[in-house]
Structures are given as structure tokens and as C-alpha cells.
Image (cartoon, rainbow, N blue to C red):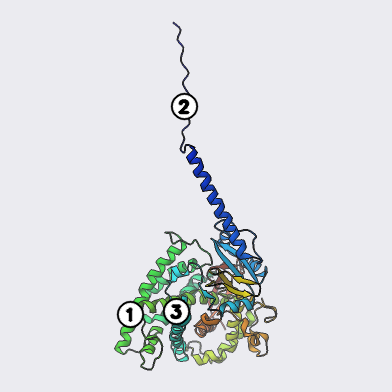
Amino acid sequence: MNSTTAPASASPLPSFMPFTPATTSWLYTTGAILFTLLALEQAVYRYKKRHLPGSSWTIPIIGKFADSLNPTMEGYKAQWNSGPLSAISVFNIFIVMASTTEHARKILNSPTYAEPCLVQSAKQVLLKENWVFLTGKDHVDYRRSLNSLFTRKALGMYTEIQDRIIRKHYKNWLETAAKDASPKPIMTVARYLNMDTSLRVFCGYYIPDEATKIISDKYYDITAALELVNFPLALPGTKIYKAIQCRKEAMYWLTLAAKKSKEAMARGDESSCMLDEWIRNISDPSWKGKKEFSDHEMAMVVLSFLFASQDAMSSGLIYAFQHLADSPEMFAKVREEQDRVRGGDMDAPITLEMLDSMTYLQAFVKESLRVMPPVVMVPYTATKPFPISENYTVPANSMIIPSFYNALHDPEVYPRPDDLKPERWLDPKDPANTTPKNYLVFGAGPHKCIGIEYALMNMTLSLAIAVGAMDWKHDITPLSYKVQIMATLFPQDHCRLAFTPRKD
């Protein structure tokens, strides 16, 4: 009996999304909406950009984000050199870059049109209610109160604290070098020196030693999060998330320090730090400024000071060490001045009067900061349409970024601008001195750095003690003169130096 097997019917392919007429319509509609949004993004970008130099089109959604992940000085210079004003877009944030001294100063001096935002993540990290983000009368009142913390009397007290802490760290550096004489990057130890010095000046011993080390180690997370462009959401694992955790820990200790300082001043103790000076000032019956500051408010101010001292001053100090190592003649001039001003006694504490007499070292510090400024730009937000030039108005809510670097390297003001030449500042008739508007290391306008004298004093004091106590050699690598751009600038190899006790 013959039998035949009926062929099996073909199994239908599985379908995860059956294309019914309704589905097809939905897909077309979604696609049309996405296309319209992307087209609108391009149209808005081109409308805002107008005639400014910059890409004719922006990459959808992310814009120049990929370029900003690893920024370079060469890339920034190319952008600045493309025109006095130029445009880019990152994550739909329209950004105008201003490269001239005139445009930079106009931005810095136009509080009715623009306010500092530092970077897009700054308010998440430093807290939106922080005084650095205040404007108008609120900012003026706050600043008036803080100005009293940088009088000559206060700076004299800070000098004593700094001298003691700096010497402690250099002793540790030499002890480490005695065990291993090979060159080592100084970025980490220099940042810890600055953090320890700053915390002791700002908070005295109201913060324990272990807390200063913890804050110093973790503060790098805040630095990383305050790069010009970062992933904008504070999701676990992101730079902004890590920075916020660091800020929470730092604020715990800083708030505790403010509380302890108030208690000490109420007992009638002597002032031993900046917090004490602040509380004593506002407790004076003749004080006419803001009198009430909560522990949290005082801690936020110290947090903002730490950002400036930890990042900007660390950058300035590291490059100054590198510049001195690379310039033996300047090193010799600084040392000769130290021997003369300090009477050959390198162990005696340095006073403000001694610092006043270190004219060559002061000129070196000023010039080192000019050649390699810690901060090359500070982002602002246009609070309303800002007529920055005769033929261009920055749209409201755009970011506008003044460059400091070009002003500091203007060959008409600083001939051979890339050369390190402290003598510029010793000749009153030199264009460097007769054109002060170009020296934007500390900014300008109502938000100009409030601690200029403190910063210059700290760098001068640190270098004076170092030159008096140590010799050092620079281990030059292929990365020594390449720039790592974070919130501030650092050598990419973190400045590799070998230290030995002073020989002569």
C-alpha cells in the first residue's frame, strides 16, 4: 500500500511588530515628527549663528560634544582665531565664543546682560544658591562682607598659617625624594599642599587632619565635573554625580567648621583663621554690611574659595615650578633675592614685609600666570538679548564665553608673548604695565576674583620657601608642554620633578 506524506505547511515567520495600517501610520507620524524636530534644530542654530564663523550645520542633539570630550589648546586657538566672535552648539546649548580683549571685557562688565554660570554643571555641583551665582545688589552686599577677609591685617595672619603648612609639605617632599630620587609628577602633592594650606587658612583646626586629606583626595571629582562640557545628568557613575557626592562630604566638614568658629568667637577666643575673622567682623557693632550668615551660607563661601584655591592656584603653582626648573637664570635671580631679603636665614618665618621686598619673584609669578593662565575662559549666560557688537546680538539664554588667553598673549601689549619675561613687570613704561586692561588672569568687572592679593601672596610665599630650601630638576617628557584642560590647565605629564635639599 503506497502512502504519501502531505507536505508540511510553511511556518509563518514570527512578527514582533505586525505592520498593520495603524502601525504604519504611527511610524510615518513619528518619523515625520523626528525629522521636523531635527530640521527645526538646524534652523534655530543657523538663525542664532547668523554670519558668525562656525560650522554651517550642527550634529543633531549632541553638537560638538564629541570634540569637547578631549579639548586641546590647539582646538581652542583655532576657534578663537576663526573670528572675534564664533559659534558652536553642544547638547542644544548655543555658545558664542569671544576672542578679543574688548569683547571679553564687555562681557565681564555687563551684568545687566550676562551673568557667570562657570559651566553648565556648576550650579548642580557648587549649589545654585552659592554667592558666586548672585547678581545685582545681593552680589554687591555679599562681596562687601567678604572684602573684609582680605585686608592687610588678615593677610598677615594668613601668611603665618601658610608658612607653617607649606614648610611641612616641602619637608615631606624631601623625605620622599631621599627614599627614591627619581622624578615624580607633582600634581597630586601640589594639590594636597594647596588644599591643606587653604583649609587651615579658611577653617583653622576646626577641621581634623584626616578630613583635609579626604577632601583633597576627593576634590579632584569636582574639578573633573567643572570641565566646560560634561554629560548633563547627575546619574550614578557620571562626573557630575561623583562631584555632588564630594561636595556633600566637604559641606559637612565646612558647615561643622563654621559652627565651631561661631562658638569659639562667642567664648572670646583669638582669631585663628578666616572664618574667625569673618565672624568677628560682622559681630562688630560698627559693621554696616550683611550681619547674619548661617553655617550653611558660610560653608558655601568656603566651598567656592576652595574651588579657586585648589584648581587655579594649583595650576599656577605647578607651572611656576616647571617654569623655574626650565629657566636656570630666573631660578638664580629668585634665589639671590631670597638670600638678600631674608638675610640668609631660610628657616625664619616669612612676613608680609619680606614678601613686599621680593620684587623679582612677584614679577616672575605675575609673568608665569600670564604665559600659562590657570583659567583661559569663564562661561557666562546671556540673561537677555546682548548686543555684543554693532552687527551681532547674542540670543537670550545662550552661553557666551570670553577668552582670557588672547588678551594675555597680545603681541602689541606683550612682545614675543609666549616668552617668559618677568622684566616686563619691572619697567613702569613697559606696555605690560601701561595696558593693565589686558591682564585678565583674575577676570574683570563685578565678578573679578575677590582674592587676588591672597592668591598672589600664596604663590609668592610657596615659591620663596621652595627656592630657599630645595633644588629641583624637570624630567621633560613628550607631554611636558602639552596642556591638559580641565576646569584649569595642567601639564599633561603632571610636571615630573626630582627634588634635592639646597646645595649652595
| Residue drawn at the location 38% of the way across and 88% of the way down | 282
Name the residue furthest top: 1
- Point out residue 19 in the picture as x, y percentages from the top left corner: 49, 37
Residue on which the image places disc 2:
11
Residue on which the image places disc 1:
259
From what the image shows, is residue 283 above or below residue 139? Answer: below
Figure disc tally: 3
Local crowd size for mark 2, using a 10 Å CA cut-off: few (<14), some (14–19), many (≥20): few
Q: Nearer the viewer, residue 146 or 397?
A: 397
Q: Which disc, if any, is residue 198?
A: 3
Please name which of the two marks, 3 or 1, marks the residue nearer to the observer. 1
Q: What residue type is disc 3 on?
A: Ser
Image position of 280 (left or right of 392): left
Q: What residue type is disc 2 on?
A: Ser
- State which tag comes first along the sequence, 2 or 3: 2
From what the image shows, is residue 30 above or below residue 223? Answer: above
- Point out residue 99 in the picture as x, y percentages from the top left corner: 63, 73
Q: Secondary structure at mark 3?
A: helix
Label 2, label 3: how many angstroms apart (C-alpha)? 75 Å
- Point out residue 173 in the picture as x, y percentages from the top left corner: 48, 75
Image position of 435 (left or right of 221): right
